[in-house]
Image (spheres, helix red, strand yellow):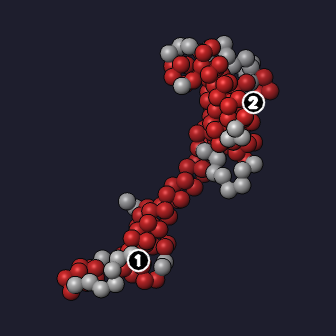
Amino acid sequence: LAQALALQGQQAAALEMAQQALQLAQSRDNVFQEIEVLRILAELHANAPGMASAAPGTASESPALRFLQQALKLASDIEGYTISEKLYQALGREYARLDDYEQAYWMTLQAEAARDKLHDQQVFSRANAMLLALSSMPATRSNAGAAESAKSPLPQYASTRNLAPLAAACART
């Protein structure tokens, strides 16, 4: 809702709404929501004229960077959590705005790694779903069905439980 208000030019209302959302997330110990709200607060500060009070090169004066670093710290403290590509991209943009191109580049690389990790997770999820579907097929089939399955490469994966070739096949789709 805060983002919608900002798009309508109501920056003050958007900031107030985002601050309320942050307080609510913190009061409910919802770290995942808190990370997202911090990212949105940073976006509001970075995109609104007059909101980003930092002079170029002064990261400590940037409210957007402070919110993003706080979100990154929270996300880093969650064991097994994959930090979102969006958060890394926002950090990269803010570092670039502050003329810290080395950090901006590093954040861009982190965003790419996060995107690749998510893609790999999705590929293996699809592969597992296909394997589960294959393993739940009835053991006996009619001759026509058996002949058709003999043409398909998928039964070999079900019998060997080798996910790598199946994951590669899914990645190409």
* Callout 2 secondary element: helix
The image quarter containing residue 155 is bottom left
Q: Position of residue 147 (x, y in %)?
A: 23, 83
Q: Position of residue 128 (x, y in %)?
A: 47, 68
Q: Position of residue 65 (x, y in %)?
A: 72, 30
**Compared with residue 128, is residue 54 higher up or lower down, i.e. above or below?**
above
Q: Position of residue 125 (x, y in %)?
A: 49, 62
On screen, residue 90 versus residue 63, left or right, reads left
**Which mark is nearer the camera, 2 or 1?**
1
Q: Could you say which is closer to the camera, residue 125 or residue 33?
A: 33
Q: Disc 2 or 1, which lies upstream in sequence? A: 2
The image quarter containing residue 46 is top right
The residue at the point 44 percent across, 66 percent down is 129
Query: Residue reaching furthest left?
Result: 144
Q: Which quadrant holds the C terminus?
A: bottom left
Residue at mark 1: 135
Residue at mark 2: 66
Dot 1 amino acid type:
Ser
The residue at the point 55 percent across, 53 percent down is 118
Query: Residue reaching furthest right?
Result: 60
Q: Could you say which is closer to the camera, residue 165 or residue 71?
A: 71
